[in-house]
């Protein structure tokens, strides 16, 4: 993005530039939203689509149960969308 400053249209605060993955976005420090260029929006949409495509319910063979087995640790909760992983 260019070096020109930008004010949030809702509250007037100066938008802060930050990296989101490989992209640069401007974000309102009060949480009112973000601004990004159209090409970056396209990249985010493609990344979101790829993230959901890899969410298929993969199955594997059930292991043989033995006396010494213990339960695996629980998986961490998965974010509802790829873009949610960028703004934590």
Image (spheres, rainbow, N blue to C red):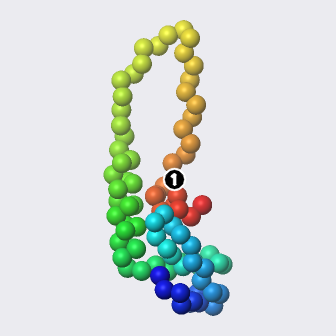
Query: Which of the pair 43/56 is nearer the observer?
Result: 43
The image quadrant that residue 87 belongs to is: bottom right
- Toward the top, the furthest residue is 67
> Is residue 10 among the parts visible in the rendering?
no
Residue ID at (54%, 38%): 75
Q: Residue 70 at x, y = what percent?
A: 57, 19
Q: Quadrant of the C terminus?
A: bottom right
Residue ID at (42%, 80%): 37
Query: Which of the pair 30/86 is nearer the observer?
Result: 86
| 77 lies above or below 20 | above
| 26 lies above or below 63 | below
Q: Residue 2 at x, y = what percent?
A: 48, 86
Q: Residue 43 at x, y = what percent?
A: 37, 68
The image quadrant that residue 77 belongs to is: top right
Mark 1 crowdedness (10 Å alpha carbons): few <14, some 14-19, many ≥20? few
Q: Residue 51 at x, y = what percent?
A: 39, 54
> Is residue 45 among the parts visible in the rendering?
yes
Residue ID at (54%, 79%): 26
Give the labeled residue for mark 1: 79
């Amino acid at each position: 993005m260019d070096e020109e400053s930008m004010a949030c249209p809702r509250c007037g605060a100066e938008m802060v530039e930050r990296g989101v993955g490989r992209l640069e976005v401007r974000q309102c420090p009060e949480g009112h939203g973000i601004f990004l260029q159209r090409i970056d929006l396209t990249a985010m949409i493609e990344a979101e689509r790829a993230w959901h495509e890899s969410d298929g319910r993969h199955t594997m063979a059930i292991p043989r149960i033995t006396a010494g087995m213990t339960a695996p640790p629980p998986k961490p909760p998965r974010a509802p969308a790829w873009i949610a992983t960028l703004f934590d």
